């Protein structure tokens, strides 16, 4: 009986160990690309998990070697490794923000590796880089990395790389604090001015978006760029400015790394009601918004003008179908019905309503024949009640004769 193979279990065991490894152990796994890809992929997923749970300390000694180890996996030819490394870098940037320990690795290793990845002919690898780099500039604000992107936008020979750099500039102009962009406003103006007339149509389109954001951040710089543009380019720019929707991104403010992140949007809508993201099970659920309408998450029994907990007034009592003629207007449905009942007999079994006495009785079996003369006789027995014509109505052939009174 031959010995059992140990290669497959050994690889699986190392991958299982990487999924629960400590940051120091992850550094040993990711420092090279010599280990099997299963273990490296498990280690990258472990890094993203720790960063998402805020268990990565940017001030620890292992942090820089760990970030460099993750960036080392970006040039790998296996798409699974590249996607996991890009996702881990995004989670690290979101967790550490503007910590100084993330500045140099991002400038010297991460950004160059991602820019090189964009120029790769493999579409899957390039897509991972296109998703990762703008996210890094959204979470981290380092002028050294921004200068690298600006220089690459002006000097790169690959249209895909220039397009990604222009996209990063657009994200920066939308979200970064103006205090950090002011020292680089001249470089931003020069880069956008050269990109608006780029040979690639996608780069020109993205550069026009950057120019629209430059209008908001630095109007004088934007006017200087627009003064150098030709008429067709200005026409395209104005069309995009007219069709542009309101920007959803909010500008960051200077402060701690958590304050530099994108602010959380309000859970209330513009009308005062709760938005769809609000927790419908909250203990404090307003009944109405400031617009007066019923809230989408309010009680179904509450309506606009009534406050929470109040019940609407009881409805009016249901009136008898046959009411006094004096309370009806000529031509109304109720008046026509009352006159038709006065003129025609009621036959058959069923409910007979007495208009004058206010009483109703259920007739016994057999035919019931009640004519208008019988009704007038009943009225004579009750002289206190009378049927009068409405004072505001003109005489009508169907009006009740005053002699009935």
Image: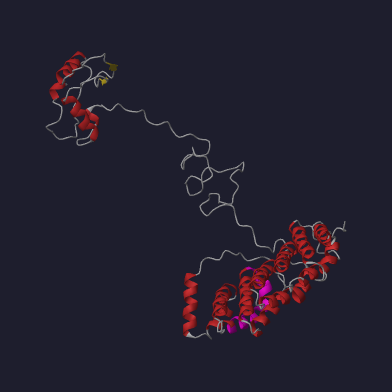
Horizontal placement of 308 versus 403: left or right?
Answer: right
Determine the image quadrant of residue 85. bottom right
Look at the image and tell me in which quarter the N terminus lies. Answer: bottom right
* Residue 192 coordinates in the image, percent (x, y): 60, 80
Quarter holding the C terminus is top left
Q: Is residue 150 above or below residue 320?
A: below
Percent across and percent down for residue 388 are 19, 26
Decide whether residue 247 is among the magenta residues: no
Q: Is residue 379 above or below residue 57?
A: above
Residue found at the far front of this picture: 1
Q: Residue at x 53, y 82 (%)?
A: 226
Q: Is residue 196 positioned above or below 70 on the image?
A: below
State the image quarter where residue 24 is shown. Answer: bottom right
Q: In screen coordinates, is 390 left or right of 125?
A: left
* Nearest to the observer: residue 185 or residue 241: 241
Residue 146 in sight: no
Instruction: Please state the total of marks drawn on the protein image.
Output: 0
Residue at 62 percent across and 79 percent down: it is 162
Tell me, yes or no, whether the highlighted magenta stretch contains residue 191. yes
Above or below, comparing residue 116 to residue 16 in the picture = below
Residue 128 in the figure: left or right of residue 66: left
Residue at 22% over, 30% down = 337
Q: Nearer the viewer, residue 18 or 134?
A: 18
Q: What residue span does the magenta drawing correspond to?
A: 175-194
With 269 as the anchor, is 394 left or right in this view? left
Q: What type of secondary structure mainly makes up the magenta span?
A: helix
Residue 283, x across and y down, in percent = 62, 41
- Nearer to the camera, 192 or 25: 25
């Amino acid at each position: 009986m031959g010995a059992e193979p140990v290669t497959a279990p050994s690889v699986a065991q190392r991958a299982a160990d990487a999924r629960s490894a400590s940051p120091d152990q992850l550094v040993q796994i990711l420092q090279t690309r010599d280990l099997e890809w299963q273990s490296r992929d498990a280690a990258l997923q472990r890094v993203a998990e720790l960063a998402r749970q805020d268990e990565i300390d940017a001030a620890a000694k292992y942090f820089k070697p760990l970030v460099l180890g993750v960036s080392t996996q970006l040039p790998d030819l296996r798409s699974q490794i590249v996607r996991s490394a890009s996702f881990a870098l995004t989670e690290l940037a979101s967790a550490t923000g503007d910590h100084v320990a993330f500045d140099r690795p991002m400038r010297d290793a991460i950004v160059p590796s991602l820019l090189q990845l964009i120029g790769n002919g493999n579409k899957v690898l390039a897509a991972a880089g296109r998703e990762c780099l703008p996210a890094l500039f959204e979470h981290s604000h380092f002028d050294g990395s921004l200068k690298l992107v600006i220089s690459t936008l002006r000097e790169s020979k690959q249209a895909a790389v220039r397009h990604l750099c222009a996209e990063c500039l657009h994200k920066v102009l939308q979200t970064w604090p103006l205090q950090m962009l002011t020292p680089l406003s001249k470089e931003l103006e020069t880069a956008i001015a050269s990109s608006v007339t780029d040979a690639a149509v996608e780069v020109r389109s993205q550069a026009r978006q950057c120019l629209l954001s430059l209008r908001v951040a630095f109007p004088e710089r934007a006017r200087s760029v627009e003064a150098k543009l030709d008429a067709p380019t200005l026409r395209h720019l104005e069309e995009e400015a007219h069709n542009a929707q309101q920007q959803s991104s909010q500008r960051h403010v200077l402060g701690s790394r958590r304050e530099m992140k994108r602010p959380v949007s309000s859970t209330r809508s513009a009308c005062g009601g709760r938005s769809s993201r609000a927790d419908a099970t909250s203990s404090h659920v307003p009944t109405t918004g400031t617009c007066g309408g019923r809230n989408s998450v309010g009680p179904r029994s509450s309506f606009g003008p009534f406050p929470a907990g109040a019940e609407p007034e009881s409805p009016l009592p249901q009136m008898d179908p046959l009411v006094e003629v004096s309370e009806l207007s000529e031509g109304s449905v109720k008046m026509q019905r009352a006159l038709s009942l006065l003129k025609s007999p009621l036959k058959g079994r069923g409910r007979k309503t007495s208009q004058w006495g206010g009483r109703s009785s259920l007739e016994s079996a057999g035919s019931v024949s009640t004519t208008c003369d019988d009704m007038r006789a009943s009225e004579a027995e009750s002289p206190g009640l009378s049927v009068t014509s409405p004072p505001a109505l003109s005489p009508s052939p169907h009006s009740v004769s005053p002699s009935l009174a």
